[in-house]
Amino acid sequence: MASFILRRLIQSGIVLLAVAMIAFLMFRFIGDPVSQMVGQETTLAERAELREKLGLNDPVPVQFLRFVGRAATGNFGISYQMGQPVDRLLAERLPATLELSVFAMIIACLIGVPLGVYTGLHPKRWLSRLFLVVSLIGISLPTFFTGIMLILVFGVELGLLSTFGRGETTQIGWWTTGLLSVSGWKSIIMPAFTLGLFQMTFIMRLIRSEMMEVMRTDFIKFARARGISEGKINFGHALRNTLVPVMTIVGMQLGSIIAFGIITESVFQWPGVGLLFLQAISTADIPIMSTYLLLVAVLFVAINLTVDLLYYVIDPRLRADNVARGA
Amino acid sequence: MEASVRPLLKISGLRVEYPGRRGTFVAVENMDLEVGRGEIVGVVGESGAGKSTIGSAIMQLLEPPGRIAAGTIELEGQRLDQLDATEMRAIRGKRISMIFQDPLTSLNPLYTVGKQLIQTIRTHSSRSEAAARQEATALLNAVGIPDPEIRIDQYPHQFSGGMRQRVVIALVLCTNPDLIIADEPTTALDVSVQAQILDLIKKLAAERNIGVMLITHDMGVIAQTTNRVAVMYRGRVVETGKTHQIIHAPVHEYTKSLIGAVPRADVKLDRFPRISYIEAATPAAKVFDIETHWLGRTRPDAKVAQPASVGPLVSVDGLTMRFVVRHAILPQNRVLFDAVKDLSLDIQEGEVMGLVGESGSGKSTVARILSGLYRPSSGSMRFDGQDVLKMSRSADVNAIRRQVQMIFQDPYSSLNPRMRVDSIVAEPIQHHRLASSRDETYAIVDDLLEVVGLGKAAGRKFPHEFSGGQRQRISIARALATRPRFLICDEPTSALDVSIQAQILNLLKDLRSALKLTVLFISHDLPVVRQMCDRVAVMKKGELCELAATDDLFNRPRHPYTTELLRLMPRI
């Protein structure tokens, strides 16, 4: 077990270094950092001086090591556009994005899993078919369209929910949360639903096909033949056996909605990192872009590691001490 | 048992049908069967006979759209076929339990054995968790699982196949059922484990006065275990009676041919008796003179110029195959497994060498090494005097590979489902450039399909249109397509019904003598080996225990393991 974690950590380190390399190359080769930092009236001599001061004349490997060293201590440089340290900017925005993404994923699981179980158990009922058709629509609709439609109905016409921003937020340590106020809840529902809709249909379809697979196995037949109740068979024996592939997908998807919920964030003007990233692209704010890249890599690596560890919790066959004993 | 007592299970006039788009398929028709308490009743038949359907019908676990169309099923006078789902659930497990074929798949892999037992016990009684656990431990002990207190908290994958089937039996017993339906309970197990499990079932049925319905295709199991037997053929019971009478004095033609097809362990017969009543092979449309035909041109005696090589055709010396079970950076942490240990074996030209052993004995590894699929960790291997492992030119290796062909166990996965049968058979001919033109290739393919008894029309179909036995014939045609000298058959008939097995074995015998093939015949089934082989090698845990002429081995085994295997062999 410990050696497994160690191995995964080493692999993660390699992945992060590779991403850091790309982020660094962005810094170095997309445009000239000096000319983006200074005004037009700066003389060539001043530029050369600045270049020397920033270490841009050093050999590339030395610069890369310096970049990694700084990143490791949380120093990602100063945003060109806002003149503030990038790490502080991201730290301000991250809670909003995490809150939105996790909330969206919870909605997706809470609705997607029961629907998947139902459609998997009764594939021929008309209700299942209805769910499937609706889910197909859910998959095909582009996120911005769903978002705009929701705003139109619940925000503009009915006036029930807030259409932009996070509402009133509360500061808890370095974390800001919108979940402690009514306006915060009103604000998060629509973007979370928009973001989670695709995941919900995805989870539902995945669970459905896995359930149909598991229900055909001998151990389910044997459990039936022993008179175990349907509820225990469906939600205990069967559902648990579908979870390994589902967890993999949920983990990957959680990573991607945190990292790439940009469209939803911009439709609802959600003050998260995605919106920040979007602004950074439009102003060529390279420190923010490269740091965002690193942040996404760290998130994916962390989520994947967590999922791998959860495998061990769910599936006893994978536990290392058992493998050694052999079949 | 007094005659006045109502039978435990009484099935009369049962008809099970599967309505489908193209008419209704009748799986079971007009079936009558009785099982009394403490009695083991066998239901025997080949695949498609409807044996398993009966078990599902009793339990109301028929796969939709299957349904009981007529007849009654009574458990001590209570009609089961009229119960609704809730009432039936109270019967399932509580009064009737079922053992499935494959112990590797009938337990939930994510729950401990104890959890599955306790859940079942508590479903059917109001016992506390602790009391149920105590009972579960006692049951594991009763079915012969050592250290039940420790084993109860283990997961199914920590048990061997035989131990898992014991767990399954404990699960079946944990509610004290009156009737157990055992559907091929030992088919997936080794012969030594099979004997233990059957003894256990017999013992428990007698001790606890449980009626057992034993569904199987294996006449040996029937002969050893059951009191009475019903023989099924295409959904109907063709004969019922005391086991002894059915085995020794069968009345119905089908029973006779079924028993005739079972390989005998005591006497070696030239051929299996002609088996009527089964899917017949198309008789060869034209008769070949194998001497002049393309197929026969490389027979050893037809060889031109080259003197017959002295010594064995295949010879291996000190063969060892080592697998790394767990990888590690430090060599001392690696877990190694020797699938084959220091094996030395000579196979003479024209001989059929049997290779026998239980699962995990390394027999299939030997087959893969000989066919060139694995490279052994150490040892040497000679084919026709040439050292195969030292060959470097790919042309030389190819020349050997052409002469060595393999027939695999599972006819369902060994043929590419997307290729037509004639392309499957033609591929080796084209690969080794054995024919000069496409037309010649396909003419040879047609002849090959005739030789194996399929007829050339089969070439235009796809593998899924054939039954298991027919597919195995295709595999044989494919193996013959390179005009091999050495044929490796890895359990070629263990996935087949006994009558089909008899046909395939007859075919292999005919081809062997016509083409003067040398054969390595791998099997776990001793009677089959007795019928097929000239000499037999017995393997256990990667090592060779005994190597002797077939008759000597069966009549005067020298190694204790061989003696044990022979003792456990089911006999009719």
Image (cartoon, helix red, strand yellow):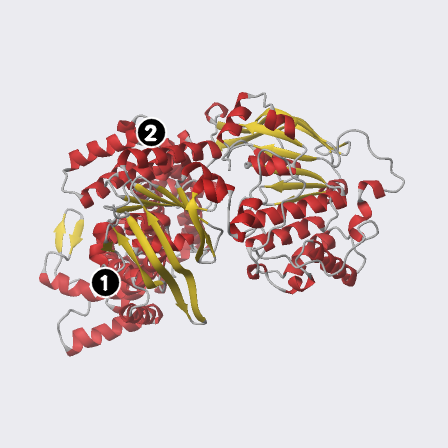
Q: Residues within 10 Å of mark 2 (few under 14, many from 20)?
A: some
Q: At which x and y percent is residue A289?
A: 36, 56
Q: Quadrant of residue A135?
A: bottom left
Amino acid type at image mark 2:
Gly
Q: Residues within 10 Å of mark 1 (few under 14, many from 20)?
A: many
Relative to B179, B20 lies left or right: right
SS for dot 1: helix
Q: Is residue B156 above or below residue A30?
A: above
**Badge 2 is on which residue?**
B144
Relative to A126, B382 lies left or right: right
Q: Is residue B569 above or below residue A83?
A: above
Relative to B442, B222 lies left or right: left
Q: Is residue A24 visible?
A: yes
Q: At which x and y percent is residue B510?
A: 71, 46
Same chain under badges 1 and 2? The reply is: no
SS for dot 2: loop
**Badge 1 is on which residue?**
A192
Closer-to-camera residue (A46/B263): B263
Q: At which x and y percent is residue A277?
A: 32, 59
The tally of labels here is 2
Q: Is residue A59 visible?
A: no
Closer-to-camera residue (A223/B332): A223
Closer-to-camera residue (A131/B418): B418
Chain for disc number 1: A
The label on residue B17 is: none
Quadrant location, the N terminus of chain B: top left
Residue extending furthest bottom? Answer: A157
Closer-to-camera residue (A80/B262): B262
Q: Which label lies toward us, 1 or 2? A: 2
Q: Is residue B436 above or below residue A267?
A: above
Q: Marks 2 and 1: in contact by CB < 8 Å?
A: no
